Amino acid sequence: MTRTALTGEEVLAAAARLVRAQGPAALTMRRLATELGTAVTSIYWHVGNRESLLDALVERTVREMGEIHPVGHTPHARIVSVARALRTALRERPQLIAMVHERGLTERMFLPAQQALVHEMHTAGLRGELAAEAVRAVQFQVVGFVLVERNRERSPEQHPSEGELWDSPTAGHDPALARALAGPVDAERLFVVSLEALVTSLLSPGEPVGGPAG
Amino acid sequence: MTRTALTGEEVLAAAARLVRAQGPAALTMRRLATELGTAVTSIYWHVGNRESLLDALVERTVREMGEIHPVGHTPHARIVSVARALRTALRERPQLIAMVHERGLTERMFLPAQQALVHEMHTAGLRGELAAEAVRAVQFQVVGFVLVERNRERSPEQHPSEGELWDSPTAGHDPALARALAGPVDAERLFVVSLEALVTSLLSPGEPVGGPAG
DNA sequence: ACCTGAACACCGTTCAAGT
DNA sequence: ACCTGAACACCGTTCAAGT
């Protein structure tokens, strides 16, 4: 019945388990202590206060997000593949990613992907500010999309749902559109469509960046 | 010194003031009561518990976000103007928008803009599923961008900043790119660039949607 | 109809005291 | 070096009691 000495790693693992299973609100110091079979105050000795525990948890998630490998034979395809891989990785850890986002480490998390993207932009012939802008555009696109997507999934029951809101009168006599907007979003498809549009535009050197104002 | 009878509106206004001034964490029932000069328990009579108070607060924000007027002479320009107006409105209420997002009412908030966008897509000749997809692509783009943007602003001091991370070796011998990625983001410009790319692609009927896979 | 204080079950955190 | 319980200052919420 005597437990082996508590370690910081052990605390972290239990904390991650709690967050994954019941969300970040369930991660209280007292519950964690019960889970570990120790006094609340022992946790403080190993990982400091709750704030630094969350920091460590998020740090670990950022490390886990490290690897991405572009695939495909053109810069366009390879950029799209990085973006898709990133989306997948983000979607596998929804609560932890939300915590990373809340704590402002989204950029750090994105760095390996950013480096891969830089390489592809160079291959595609982009340099300097133009390449930097292209990299960031893709980054914002992916992270933003995943945040919105996740939000939609977490709250499938909007109080007046899109479905109820998009009855025929408001849809401008376009029943197919009304049906489409009332139905669920094909997020995968929407993601690829927007991404393709963005990447195509970024890699075409003809258009002046900033585009026509109207 | 006797205060006039407390009203639900009064409670809501004080709550909004607290959130705006000190963030959502500062909105505790006890602090709110002190602010209002009443007992904590009075608040419960007027607005129910904390959860429903936050609901009401968010509801009010969604209502406030109602109006947007497209400007410009082409559908392209008018769509871009709606997106920009929306971004501006979202950025004026950062904490409240975060709360709307957390509570899953982002869609409801976007509805008036969505209706305006549908109109413009129709004018541009898009119909049915294609139009619906275009509307949603713009919606995801704007909301996602603002979420990322807001996150970056809230945490300007990344522990290893992008600046430190992008020293010359990692940047692939492109000092201008390194400088650009190390510096601050021109969010306005990035927003417009990505948006222009997206809208241009959505409104061009030549390209098959879904694009080349690589 | 509206307001109140007391009480309950939770929090995070500190600290002196143990081994 | 590691663990503990007691104590403090906070929470949200309920409820019986007041007017």
Image: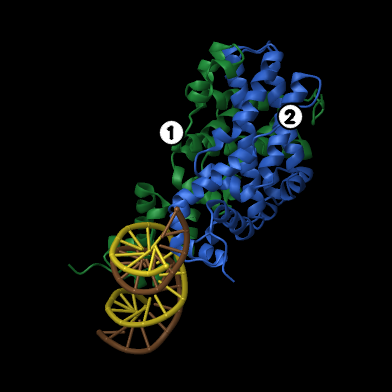
Chain colours: A green, B blue, C brown, D yellow
| Residue drawn at the location 79% of the way across and 30% of the way down | A209
In the figure, B208 relative to B94: above or below? above
Residue type (three-letter) at the residue carrying disc 2: His
Left or right of A36 in this view: B37:
right
From this viewpoint, is residue A194 visible?
no
| Residue drawn at the location 49% of the way across and 24% of the way down | A164
In the figure, B37 relative to B108: above or below? below
Circle 1 residue: A157
Image spot of residue A66 (x, y percent): 52, 45
Mark 2 neighbour class, 10 Å CA radius: few under 14, some 14 to 19, many 20 or more: few
Circle 2 residue: B69
Image spot of residue B19 (x, y percent): 59, 56
Image spot of residue A186 (x, y percent): 50, 23
Q: In which quarter of the image is the N terminus of chain A?
A: bottom left
Q: Do the residues labelled 2 and 1 touch (CB within 8 Å)?
A: no
The chain holding disc 1 is: A
Residue type (three-letter) at the residue carrying disc 1: Glu
Image spot of residue D18 (x, y percent): 37, 69
Q: Which of B91 and A164 is in front in this view?
A: A164
Mark 1 neighbour class, 10 Å CA radius: few under 14, some 14 to 19, many 20 or more: few
Q: Which of A119 and B27 is in front in this view?
A: B27
The chain holding disc 2 is: B
Labels in figure, total: 2
